[in-house]
Amino acid sequence: MRIVIGEDSVLFREGLARLLMDAGHDIVGKAGDTDELIRLVQQLGPDLVISDIRMPPGNSDDGARAARTLRAQFPELGIVLLSQHIESAHSVELAGQGRFGYLLKDRTLDVDDFLDSIQRVASGGSALDAEVVARLLSPLGRTDPMAVLTPRERDVLALMAEGRTNAAIARRLWLSDRTVETHVSGIIAKLGLGENADGHRRVLAVLAYIASAAVSDPIRR
């Protein structure tokens, strides 16, 4: 896989690059700010971009803004955002388009899981950090549409949000594939997504949670 890394910390950037190269990936570019990141992606056409959210020149959410710019230009580009803390403001729009991951930097220490996550994103799936998912799926008020889901449906949706397939969810929860399919259908129906025709109902189900959590309890980086 051809990857461009956007990270202003030289130590973290070089360590991440070495990890990915040792796993057999090709690091075609490394950027220390978002202007350079955008330029490298435009010039090199990688399969995947891994970028910190907080980057120069603004050192706020510049990485996420650059990701939106690149997604508009390259719809098939896989994008993985990294952060030290949980932030949900930009994940809704990007995750709705697929090929997107949101991971906490600390999770990169679990090498196998991190490599699996970026592979899922590059293959067209999604990868939201389990801690992010847990926060976004925290109990919500009775007026929230998410309250109609059962605890088991919430468990299934949490794993869906991590980009897991039905078979992987079944293994994790010790359920049959058919039972997981039933839960997924129930989630989609209860959230009113059954008539959606764009083929991304699984992602939309996750986004419904993210959008609801962001409104009721905004999380800032």
Image (spheres, rainbow, N blue to C red):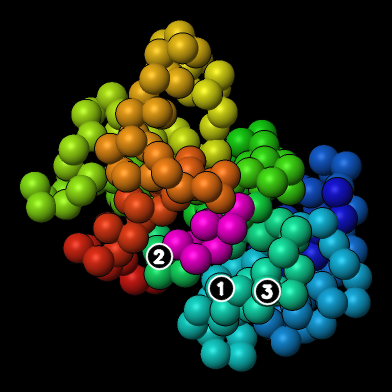
* Circle 1: residue type: Ala
Residue under numbered circle 2: 87
Residue under numbered circle 3: 72
Could one spot residue 77 in this view of the protein?
Answer: yes
For the magenta stretch, what is the residue range?
Answer: 91-98
* Circle 2: residue type: Glu
* Circle 3: residue type: Ala
Q: Does the magenta stretch include residue 94?
A: yes
Viewer-proximal residue, 124 or 48?
124
Q: How many labels does the image show?
A: 3
Could one spot residue 155 in this view of the protein?
Answer: no
Q: Which mark is residue 64?
A: 1
Mark in the foreground, 2 or 3: 3
Viewer-proximal residue, 139 or 7?
139
Residue 58 position (above or below residue 43): below
- Viewed as shown, does residue 142 lie left or right of 202? left
- Which quarter of the figure has residue 165? top right
Furthest toward the bottom, the residue is 57
Residue 64 image point, x, y percent: 56, 73
Residue 6 image point, x, y percent: 70, 71
- Viewed as shown, does residue 118 lie left or right of 178? right
Viewer-proximal residue, 109 or 191?
191
Label 2 residue SS: loop
In primary-sequence order, the first of circles 1 and 2 is 1
Q: Which mark is residue 29?
A: none
